[in-house]
Amino acid sequence: MQWSVAQRVARRFVAGETMDEAIAVAKQLKQQNILSTLDYLGESVSSEANTREVVSAYQKLIERSAAEQLQASVSVKPTHLPQP
């Protein structure tokens, strides 16, 4: 995120801009017995290659979540699916 105002507003809801940042926040939440949802942003895919990137990102999120034994789910958006 490039805008400081947007960063301040989003920081409450967006744990980070990288997977490592999001996993770190999910770990902190787990210590407080708070469940988390992990998302991969970047909606509106336009090709099969974009969809493959999204699927790969979600697979990594799920694998990391399992490896870290997080109490986290993932949220997949319909906009991540290519339009016919």
Image (cartoon, rainbow, N blue to C red):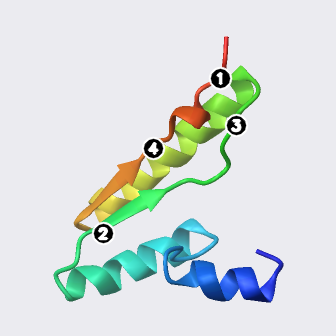
Dot 2 amino acid type: Glu
Q: Quadrant of the C terminus?
A: top right
In front: 56, or 11? 11
Labels 4 and 2: the sequence-earlier one: 4
Q: For residue 4, which quarter of the picture?
A: bottom right
- For label 3, the residue is 44
Tell me the distance, in whole angstroms, between the alpha carbons under discs 3 and 1.
Answer: 7 Å
Q: Which badge, 2 or 3, is on the more N-terminal residue?
A: 3
Report the side of 77 relative to 36 (left or right). Answer: right
Q: Residue at x 65, y 38 (%)?
A: 53
Read off the residue under disc 2.
68
N-term mark: 1 or 4: 4
Q: Secondary structure beneath disc 3?
A: loop
Please identify the quadrant where the N terminus is shown. bottom right
Residue matched to label 4 = 59
Q: Residues under labels 1 and 4: Cα distance?
A: 18 Å
Cα distance in 3D space between marks 2 and 3: 30 Å
Q: With respect to residue 40, does 33 lie above or below? A: below
For the point 41% across and 49% down, which residue is it? 75
The picture places residue 34, in percent across and down from the top left corner, at 22, 78
Classed neighbour count for the residue bearing mark 1: other residues with Cα under 10 Å, few (<14), some (14–19), many (≥20): some
Q: Nearer the viewer, residue 9 or 45?
A: 9
Mark 3 or 4, closer to the camera: 3
Residue 3 percent across, percent down from the top left: 82, 81
Q: How many numbered discs? A: 4
